[in-house]
Every structure is written in C-alpha cells, then in structure tokens.
Image: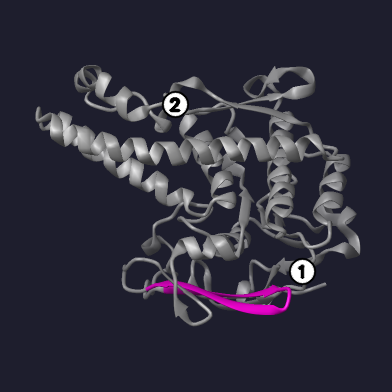
Amino acid sequence: MFVSALSLSHFRSHRSTRLEFDGRPVAIFGANGAGKTNILEAISLFSPGRGLRRAAADELARKPEAIGWKLTAEVSAPGAMHQLETWAEGGGARQVRIDGKAASQIALGRLLRVLWLVPAMDRLWIEAAEGRRRFLDRMTLSFFPEHGEAVLNYEKAMRDRNRLFRDEVSDPHWFSALEARMGEAAAVIGANRAATLAYLREAQAGAVTAFPVAGLRLSEAGETGDLTGALAAHRPRDRAAGRTLIGPHRTDLEAEFAIRQLPAQQCSTGEQKALLISLILANARALQARTGQAPVLLLDEVAAHLDAARRAALYDEISAPGLQALMTGTEAQLFDSLGTRGQNLYISEEGGLSRAAESA
C-alpha cells in the first residue's frame, strides 16, 4: 500500500498542488523555506491526530487568504484504490472522508499507517518526558488505532479530577466516578504500550541492520497496577499538589544503546539520531509483520548527523519492497546513494511548489 497521488489546496505554502508517486522512496530537495516539510505534513494528516507539527486545524490554511484548506490522497492497495480526504473550513474542526463517505480519524489509522521522524525529535532523549511519551504513543497508535481515543478519554477524566481539586470539591462520589474512568482507560493504554514495546523488541532482534539496537523499557512512575484503587489511596496527596501525580501520564520511555549499555541521553548526537532511526525502522518492520502492511515513512531532514555510510545503509533499508518513504534535504547530493531506486522531487524557491516539482 502506498500514496500514489497527493493534492493540496490552500494548505500552508500551497495554493494548488498535485504530486504523483510510484511507490519508490521519494527524495524531496530544495532550499530552506521552499516548502518541503509541508508535503510531509500533508501526508501525516492522513493519520489520527494533529500531524507531524501538531498544528491546530486553523493554523494550516494558506495565508493571507485563510479560507480553509483541503488535502486529497489516492492510496494504492493490492486489488483496490482508496481516496482519502481531510479538510477544515472557516476555522472549523478537521473533517475526514474515505471513498466519499464521512469517516473518523481512527478509520484513517486502520487504512493507512504513517510514521515520521522530524528534526524536533533529535533532542528527544535529553528533553522532558512528555516528548518521549508522545513518541511512544505515536508508535503505539500505529499498531492500535483506537489507542488515541483511550489516551483522550484518560486525559479528559484527569482534567476533570484536577478541576475538582482546584474547586475544593470533597464529595467522594465525584472522584470515584472519574477515577474509575481513568483506571479503565489506563488499563488499555498500559496494555497497548507494553505490546508495542514487545513488537519493537522482536523486530529489532530479528533484523539485519546497520543501525544500533535500542534497549527499551517504561519507567515505573506511570505503572501502578490497579490505578483506580491507587488514585483513591493517593487522593490526599494529589489534593495537596492540586493535580494527579500517578498514572500513565507520568510514564517515561527509557532507551539505551544496547551493545554499549549506554543510556540514550549520554550518547553522542549522531548516536541519538541513529537510535531514533533504528526505532522507526523497527516500527515499520513490526507493522509489516503484524498487519501485512508496510507503513508510509516521513523522514524530514533525515540526513542530518548521518555520515555517508549511514545514509547509504538507510537508503538500502527503505528500498525494501512495499515500503514507501518520503525524505527531505537541502541538496540532491544527500540522496546520491539512493540512485534509481528512488523518485526525486526538486522544489524551486522561486517557482513555488505548484510548478517546481520535477520527477527524475
């Protein structure tokens, strides 16, 4: 399965653009600011959530018109073609259609699996745990499209519980109802995350790859067993803090460079990047093994911090049959070792995306 065509209307820097792909890896190059990442962001919106920039729907419209935006993708699958559409008008919520019928974002996730790696993630291992949880949940969502709904349900119930603390509500029945909802959602979240790590470990153990194996585990902070009971027991402490101090929103993803037994945060910049790439590739292999469907990989400025040998190794791995990857970079030379295995798109800063994309 791969995206065979992509149309963008009044999206970011695009007034009206149509691109066609043949299933091979795609190298998109051009000057900074030419709009390369916008193409990747458009494809990322054909998965549940807010895309690779986590932008609100009203932030995606081309300026200064701001009349709304629309994206259309044609997806080629064995024996079938699907048309995916997503759009927002007049500051409204994002809407989705699949093959002409209204659909949910979860339905997108069941049809097309999309993974991405962007420069903002390069500091993943040395910054706050929130980014690592988001990274973990994006991987989990690729296996379990309903995972996002469980996370949203948990977070809504937690916000309501925290509001009770701020409003100095003491009625235990209100707390018990919210804590039961949090416990139910947390059980789903925990099971999905644990299964995802198991799939990743399996995919790494059986792989022939030039990228380092990442040892993974979840911190104990978010692992509480029976969360409903734990929340009730911790209610006095949470009331004093004014917020919920235990639960899956406190989980951290810990990683190490396995062969060196070195925590990821102590690795060099290049090693940290290699660990991220290794996990994205393992995620892709695990998805293909579990679902029979390879994902679409979006790799923004992926060549940064990679030497020529590692770039060549990456291109070898993403050239596997059935795997579609779209990459960006400032220079065509970054993709030389991809050769004829890839499709090249040049974006001219002067001409704009609508007429400057050329397939080589």
Mark 1 residue crowding within 10 angstroms, few (<14) / some (14–19) / many (20+)? many
Question: Residue 23's mark?
Answer: 1
62 over 27 or under it: above or below:
below
In terms of depth relative to the viewer, which is nearer, 128 or 224?
Answer: 224
Residue 111, by quadrant, is bottom right
Residue 281, by quadrant, is top right
Q: Amino acid at mark 1?
A: Gly
Q: Which residues are magenta?
A: 69-88
Residue positioned 41% across, 47% down in the render: 150
Residue positioned 45% across, 21% down in the render: 221
Residue positioned 41% across, 51% down in the render: 149
106 over 285 or under it: above or below:
below
Judge from the rendering whether residue 68 lies leftward or rightward of residue 161; answer left or right.
Answer: right
For disc 2, the marked residue is 222
Judge from the rendering whether residue 116 lies leftward or rightward of residue 89; answer left or right.
Answer: right
Residue 202 in sight: yes
Choose the circle earlier in sequence order: 2 or 1. Answer: 1
Q: Position of residue 107 (x, y in %)?
A: 50, 65
Mark 2, mark 1: which one is toward the viewer?
2
Q: Position of residue 271 (x, y in %)?
A: 74, 29
Pointers 2 and 1 in contact (CB under 8 A)? no
Q: Amino acid at mark 2?
A: Gly
Instruction: For mark 2, give the secondary structure.
Output: helix
Residue 250, by quadrant, is top left
In terms of depth relative to the viewer, which is nearer, 5 or 164?
Answer: 164
Q: Principal SS element in the magenta part?
A: strand
Mark 2 residue crowding within 10 angstroms, few (<14) / some (14–19) / many (20+)? some
Instruction: For mark 1, give the secondary structure.
Output: loop
306 over 104 or under it: above or below:
above
Q: Position of residue 155 (x, y in %)?
A: 33, 41
Judge from the rendering whether residue 327 lies leftward or rightward of residue 210; answer left or right.
Answer: left
